Image: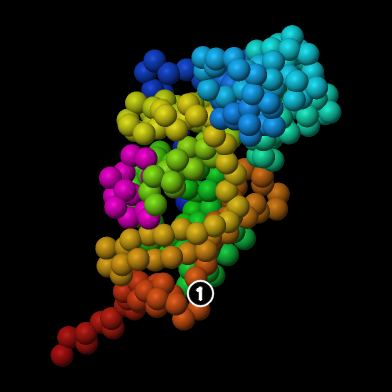
Amino acid sequence: MDPVEAGTGRTTLAMPVHPVPGHTGGMASSSGVSDFLRSRRARLNPEEAGLPADGRIRRVPGLRRDEVARLAGVSVEYYTRLEQGRAANPSAEVLDNLARALRLDATEREHLLDLLARPAPARRASPAPPQRVRPGLHLMLETLQHVPAFVLGRRTDVLAANRLARMVITDFEAMPAPQRNMARYYLLDPEARERVGDWEQVAAETVAVLRLEAGRYPDDRRLSDLVGELMVRSPEFPAWWNDHRVLRRTHGVKRYQHPDVGELVFAYESLQPPGDPDQTLCVYNVEPGSPTAESLRLLADWTAPQPARPLSSGR
């Protein structure tokens, strides 16, 4: 049964742990650092990095370790230790130089810092409490009656959604609590492939969002279980996960193909509510007077709760 937020009478979504056989936690480690740095240098060629051709045959794509070290201004030995997760506390200057050498964007640099962070001594951790959406955010969702809006938590868990979000995307409230997750919907629900425009791009970007979170929370067992399930059940997930792309969603365009009203085009904004860095408010805005605005009006009218009919007097 879903926990009920105190004083509101509204349900919030707790995501229980559902272990995947053979899958273990602890996703960010020295191997995580190594895999990420190797993937970043593999995507660059010497010409892009401004290095002259040296005539040597390359057995693998991308830059070699000695070339990254030269661009970053460190010794090959030090870069090798860094890539292997054996270099303690690299300086800000070294990280800046390395980020420039590998052409890392701000999100990739943040991810590298997460991967390099030394974990605290191992100890038994208490399970994280269920995430709850505070009453003010619930009220905001209810106030936004003309556009889809929802709140995501850790692991892209869908914590709350207004009526239009449930009509446009999918009815998360009709799902069992453990399945109310955006990544799980995009990658495992056959309906998503038909309804979500640019499905492959959206699904791949969602995997990149999970990758970023795995770096921030390497001991999150629920995230580890979700990754294990997606690895087993989604044909596309392993390749997207193993390319080590990371992404933080901020704004952009989303397209949906609704079975009743056709194409819907939104300009979405993702905002972090004050006081909770692990929740994201997502609002799908529309241009006034656009075809999408008219389609949403129709959807809202069709799904509006019907007023109760007066009882017959019996005469």
Residue placed at 71% from the left, 49% from the top? 275
Task: Measuring from the top left, give residue 278's x and y in whole percent.
Answer: 62, 43
Q: In the rendered view, does 260 fall on the left or right side of 127?
A: left
Mark yes or no: residue 6 visible: no
Task: Measuring from the top left, give residue 34's x and y in whole percent.
Answer: 61, 18
Residue placed at 55% from the left, 44% from the top? 153
Asked whether 307 falls inside the magenta stretch, the response is: no
Q: Main secondary structure of the magenta part?
A: helix
Which segment is the magenta one?
186-197
Q: Which residue carries the number 1 mark?
A: 287
Outermost residue on the front side: it is 55
Outermost residue on the left side: it is 315
Residue 46 higher or lower than 122, as above or below: below
Going by the numbered disc 1, the residue's amino acid type is: Glu
Task: Measuring from the top left, give residue 112's x and y in whole percent.
Answer: 67, 28
Mark yes or no: residue 205 visible: yes
Other-residue count near label 1 (Cα within 10 Å), few / some / many at <14 / 14–19 / ≥20: few
Residue placed at 43% from the left, 18% from the top? 23
Residue placed at 50% from the left, 59% from the top? 253
Task: Give the quadrant of residue 109.
Answer: top right
Task: Measuring from the top left, give residue 124's x and y in whole percent.
Answer: 62, 16
Residue 63 higher or lower than 260, as above or below: above
Q: Identify the image quadrant of the N terminus.
A: top left
Q: Nearer the viewer, residue 16 or 112?
A: 112
**Count of numbered circles on the image:** 1
